[in-house]
Image (cartoon, coloured by chain):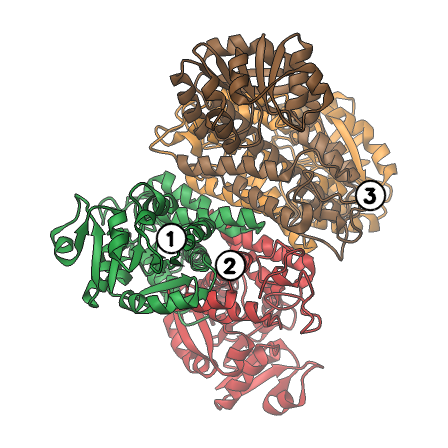
Chain colours: A orange, B brown, C red, D green
Amino acid sequence: MEIGFIGLGIMGRPMALNLRKAGHSLFVPERASLDAECRAAFTVVPDARAVARSGEVIILMVPDTPDVEAVLFGPSGVAEGLSPGKLVIDMSSISPTATKEFAAKVNALGCDYLDAPVSGGEVGAKNAALTIMVGGPQKAFDRARPLFEAMGRNITLVGEQNGAGQTCKVANQIIVALTIEAVAEALVFAAKAGADPAKVRQALMGGFASSRILEVHGERMITRGFAPGFRIALHQKDLNLALQAARELGVALPSTALAQQLFSACVAAGGGGLGPFRDGAGAGGDGGAEGGARTWGLTRVVPPRDAPLKL
Amino acid sequence: MEIGFIGLGIMGRPMALNLRKAGHSLFVPERASLDAECRAAFTVVPDARAVARSGEVIILMVPDTPDVEAVLFGPSGVAEGLSPGKLVIDMSSISPTATKEFAAKVNALGCDYLDAPVSGGEVGAKNAALTIMVGGPQKAFDRARPLFEAMGRNITLVGEQNGAGQTCKVANQIIVALTIEAVAEALVFAAKAGADPAKVRQALMGGFASSRILEVHGERMITRGFAPGFRIALHQKDLNLALQAARELGVALPSTALAQQLFSACVAAGGGGLGPFRDGAGAGGDGGAEGGARTWGLTRVVPPRDAPLKL
Amino acid sequence: MEIGFIGLGIMGRPMALNLRKAGHSLFVPERASLDAECRAAFTVVPDARAVARSGEVIILMVPDTPDVEAVLFGPSGVAEGLSPGKLVIDMSSISPTATKEFAAKVNALGCDYLDAPVSGGEVGAKNAALTIMVGGPQKAFDRARPLFEAMGRNITLVGEQNGAGQTCKVANQIIVALTIEAVAEALVFAAKAGADPAKVRQALMGGFASSRILEVHGERMITRGFAPGFRIALHQKDLNLALQAARELGVALPSTALAQQLFSACVAAGGGGLGPFRDGAGAGGDGGAEGGARTWGLTRVVPPRDAPLKL
Amino acid sequence: MEIGFIGLGIMGRPMALNLRKAGHSLFVPERASLDAECRAAFTVVPDARAVARSGEVIILMVPDTPDVEAVLFGPSGVAEGLSPGKLVIDMSSISPTATKEFAAKVNALGCDYLDAPVSGGEVGAKNAALTIMVGGPQKAFDRARPLFEAMGRNITLVGEQNGAGQTCKVANQIIVALTIEAVAEALVFAAKAGADPAKVRQALMGGFASSRILEVHGERMITRGFAPGFRIALHQKDLNLALQAARELGVALPSTALAQQLFSACVAAGGGGLGPFRDGAGAGGDGGAEGGARTWGLTRVVPPRDAPLKL
């Protein structure tokens, strides 16, 4: 299939390469930063408008709502290159509300629209193992399915209304943030109470407390593996989407709101731009006396400087 | 083995029967409420002192810290019947701090002590599938292991200090409460935003948001299966243990504290004595207009009476 | 002085009338909704551009950030009518960040800018008793002072940088919201514990717990005087300004975030569009059994239906 | 009047001296720590039993619930020295629930009981300016009034049931804690947003945000006057009374619970044993780069080390 692809970042690049590997032809916009591998694999065209003209399906993978808006409707943007019958798939994680507006505008040009945000991180993107949450018409979903299958594994049409995919992604981010906080509070508590957090984690896996987060992030908390896997700033952006939408909907999300503030505390304490946990500046040097709990996920409102965790 | 067993409640009864099934002899204190099956299976003796005299190992499974204290050190209690070399195993879920005191007193009588709280609920107790979290000396643990294996599956010596098992159980309860809240906030958000929570749950299983709670309790939230599985009052007791210990230790557990208050809101709204979710008075009649979100786990601070969830 | 005034709402109308009473000439844009008193008191001109041409000082009093932006920089807006030497005063409560941008644009046209939000409500506006919090150059503040004195009493130049007034207003709204919550939790607690909340309030006035909120809102909570004084939706908007700015600044405001969610819970329970406390649909009819606590300010996450407050 | 007085601590000592100054005779139990001024002013008797025998009214001012219990009902305690017609006044701040039990036991001996906790701190105690919140029979209150008037100013019979005074004190502590947090979040926000917190405080005094806490503690936050006025550990004890009682009553106090955790965070960060704000070890040395926000009241979950507050 002829595919336009916009957004060759940490996630987008391996996703596009996986589509190429599956035999599709990809068109991407010119960027000074395009590396040799990309220039060899994809056809480079001048701008987003040209991408939209070249592809039957146009896929977006950019950071935030304003980026999607600019790429779609800005000057020399996708909208200028669309013609009836094309399909736009936004795989970025953005506002469910704005998604409905963007879809309506694209539909008015005679094209279909799918919102299809992903989870699974860079590793999932590279291994074509992403979870893909889709909102939009069944027909468009069926048309896109082979593409999704080249990039991910757990693919769900959450609803036939645009925005359903983004809503699902927001729900995902709520659960992930709150579960990280849950595991962090539990392990910090256990460590401070004198138990070995590694033994505690092991005892809890398999019971009602078990989760992917306890498995993966719990392990990292214990081994102090604070190498960045995802930027806090992006997770904050996602929780912000949740809280803004909740305010509009009149839903109270007390724990989500608290987690957002704990993120801010973490950022303020110096863990902002990096991993889900901490600065990590100097992978091993995670910080003398106070390095302990502060670096554990969201929770760390308590820099236990005098009584570092026994790990 | 000759075993004294005190506490034949919802959990204790099937645990004791499983020990019997494994070939052990059990001694239990006289109670008017003892049913025919128990009278047939166990040897009934007058009181806790007699139980302690009869058994080589004495197992407790009672509701709360004061109950353990009364059974152990009250008049005609276990302590009066102990002699050097016996082993006391407290499988109740109680205070880690009090556990250390109880253990010290029992040790002073020349006996070993294990704290070995469980998780897994009534179903786990019946199926001999409990998770057992143990604190105490390795030697005592080895001696008790065959008994634990008759009652559970996932058996961990969390630490050789008494209290480590109880600390682990508290960590378990923190994670379970906060994950229920996480799933509830996410699914309420998704439903209010117009998505189908069942589809959302399905899309999230398998990704980073996946957990035993999303699987089991998420399902119940969606199908409105609010039949009680565990009493909120007991979960509140456990979170209270966490918060009291945290205060003594100088640890901040902000999300745990918030979850405790959301439990209280749930209790106040009429869901107190029953399931993890709701009143359930009249299984099907989960209450028209306002039945929606209030009944979902801890979260339900928002009785959305005018805008019931689309489920 | 020749003054342009835009925004004759609940607050703006009495403010403009007070300026007229002090002897100034006011120019206002044509609106179908202008009543006879306003038409008599003010000179009506076609639009915001004409207002800016007519006045030496142009005052804005509109609901939200986008409204200020539209009035200033939209088609036929204030910016089109400005000429060097004029002074723009925005008395709306809006984003501190956006304020800096608006000020820079107005400065580029050779004009001064003051942000001067108020507190004190409709009563304060009518009695020329508003608290006015100003950000901007000392010279512009001195020029505007006679106008401020015609509208308010407690007038402070918070800082010479634009945005300082708006920042101060946000701080005001944080304190007001959290103090309402403080008083509500304390009085609900006291009432549920069997004490008379009126006696409790009386005992606390004069001590360290005393505040304007305990005096005014505490009284209303006790007498159930839930007639609307301010719209929750506007207070939510203000807290949202706080939380958005805090996120940008990397400041954690945990209690503010929680209060915002309790507002949402209150809105969801049916108290949205009205008073600081509740729906009040039917002033006296504050709702049988559950009318008690739910209607008390932010707090009411607990509709104590079975045990109504003893008031 | 002949008065027994037990508890000559930071608060009790000046209170007792004020009673002496008003012409009453005081009997106190022997303590090695009694200083010359106390030995000169009061009659020293062997123990609490002797105190109860000597006084017509017996006043207690001790730290916590177990202390009151020990003094009243322990060996050689007050109860052993009581005879019908005497009046016991507990001015400590303790559990409302336990108070009811203690009162019932004292009543059974033919004596009246008043719970009469105070607020106002050491300064209020010295200046006979305490706020006194009383629970108990009107007749007993009338009898005690002259004593209260020798120690305080704002004296209220909150209810004729014992415990009402303690409940009121708990309400007081809820409001004080949450208002400190409110002021701290607002001033930290303002400072981080670039405004001068002193100007902000000044602008807010007199409006709806005004409170005794903004006046007194707001001033201290700005001048960094972190000399201890009250021990965090005692305020934590009081909030714990609130949260325990709330749990029993089924009331949700979400902001109080959060404040308690922020206290813990403050304690963990090294501000535990001292003032309402911070360690203060070295009055002026409030701690380099990070001294800023962390030391501000409860809030300080954000040690803004890289961007210290502009004060």
Q: Residue at x 54, y 60 (%)?
A: C191
Task: Quickly name the residue at label 3.
Answer: B284
Q: Mark 1 and mark 2: span between their CA atoms? A: 15 Å
Q: Residue at x 59, y 60 (%)?
A: C236
Mark yes or no: residue B170 visible: yes
| Residue type, numbered disc 1 | Ser
Q: Nearer the viewer, residue C281 or D82?
A: D82
In the shown orientation, is residue C44 left or right of residue D148?
A: right
Secondary structure type for disc 3: loop
Q: Nearer the viewer, residue D182 or A22?
A: D182
Q: Mark on residue C113?
A: none
Residue C84 sits above or below residue A222 on the image: below
Q: Mark on residue C190?
A: 2
Q: Mark on residue D93?
A: 1
| Residue type, numbered disc 3 | Gly
Q: Nearer the viewer, residue A155 or C228?
A: C228
Badge 1 and badge 2 both on one subunit: no
Chain identity of mark 2: C
Q: Mark 3 and mark 2: span between their CA atoms? A: 36 Å
**How many residues crowd mark 3 within 10 Å: few (<14), some (14–19), many (20+)?**
few
Residue A252 sits above or below residue D208 on the image: above
**How many residues crowd mark 2 within 10 Å: few (<14), some (14–19), many (20+)?**
many
Badge 3 and badge 1 both on one subunit: no
In the shown orientation, is residue C153 left or right of residue D16?
A: right
The quadrant where residue A256 appears: top right
Mark yes or no: residue A89 visible: no
Secondary structure type for disc 1: loop
Q: Mark 3 and mark 1: span between their CA atoms? A: 48 Å
| Residue type, numbered disc 2 | Ala
In the shown orientation, is residue B294 left or right of residue C184?
A: right
Secondary structure type for disc 2: helix
